[in-house]
């Protein structure tokens, strides 16, 4: 799926399980003038996996691959705000996705306190509809 410049997307790539790997990632993006808006890195069984939210997928991909990192995979995201002061919001929102038959591939928060979710491409339209409904309800509640 092509993601337009300026559109938020999740970039993912394997990172080596070694000191400085995340610094190499951050330095490459910084030199290219690309900011990460949220995400994280996890190591499981000796393999690092990075997922970060960016708005310049082509620039991020080029910068990371030029630094010897990658390959980079880009995925569209859906985002929603949860009422941080209300326990159970994560379960309530993700239950809606689950009840609609939508699998969650990746979930993290961004720097603007939004829940960022990557779903299979074919589930994107339904997930966006659920996010829009959630947002309307949240605003109506005043939270």
Image (cartoon, rainbow, N blue to C red):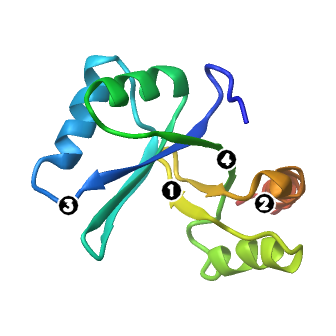
Tag 1–tag 4 contact (CB < 8 Å): no
Circle nearer the N terminus (4, 2): 4
Specify whether 82 is left or right of 113. Answer: right
Q: In which quarter of the view is residue 97 placed?
A: bottom right
Which mark sits nearer the N-terminus, 4 or 3?
A: 3
Marks 3/2 in contact by CB < 8 Å: the verdict is no
Considering depth in this image, is 76 or 81 the residue closer to the camera?
76
Who's the residue at 64% across and 82% down the image? 88
Distance from Cα at disc 3 to Cα at disc 2: 40 Å
Residue 66, which numbered label? none
Q: Give the residue drawn at x 65%, y 63%.
A: 82
Label 2 – label 1 distance at C-alpha: 17 Å
Mark 3 neighbour class, 10 Å CA radius: few under 14, some 14 to 19, many 20 or more: some
According to the image, label 1 marks what residue?
A: 109
Residue under pointer 2: 138
> Along the horizontal axis of the image, is 88 left or right of 57?
right
From the image, tell me which residue sits under label 3.
17
Disc on the earlier residue, 1 or 4: 4
**Do callouts 3 and 1 mark residues in contact (Cβ within 8 Å)?**
no
- How crowded is the residue under tag 1: few (<14 C-alpha within 10 Å), some, or many (20+)? some
Residue highlighted by disc 4: 77
- Residue 67: x, y in percent? 25, 28
Q: Disc count in the image?
A: 4
Instruction: Assign a secondary structure to mark 1.
Output: strand
Q: Tell us which disc is closer to us: 4 or 3.
A: 3
């Amino acid at each position: 799926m092509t993601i337009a410049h300026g559109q938020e997307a999740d970039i993912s790539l394997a990172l080596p399980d070694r000191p400085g790997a995340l610094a190499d990632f951050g330095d490459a993006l910084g030199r290219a003038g690309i900011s990460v808006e949220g995400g994280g890195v996890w190591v499981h069984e000796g393999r690092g996996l990075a997922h970060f939210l960016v708005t310049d997928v082509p620039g991020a991909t080029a910068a990371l691959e030029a630094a010897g990192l990658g390959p980079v995979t880009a995925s569209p995201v859906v985002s929603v705000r949860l009422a941080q002061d209300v326990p159970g919001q994560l379960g309530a929102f993700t239950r809606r996705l689950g009840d609609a038959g939508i699998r969650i591939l990746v979930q993290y928060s961004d720097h603007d306190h939004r829940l960022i979710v990557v779903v299979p491409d074919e589930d994107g339209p339904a997930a966006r509809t659920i996010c829009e409904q959630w947002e309307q309800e949240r605003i109506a509640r005043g939270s």
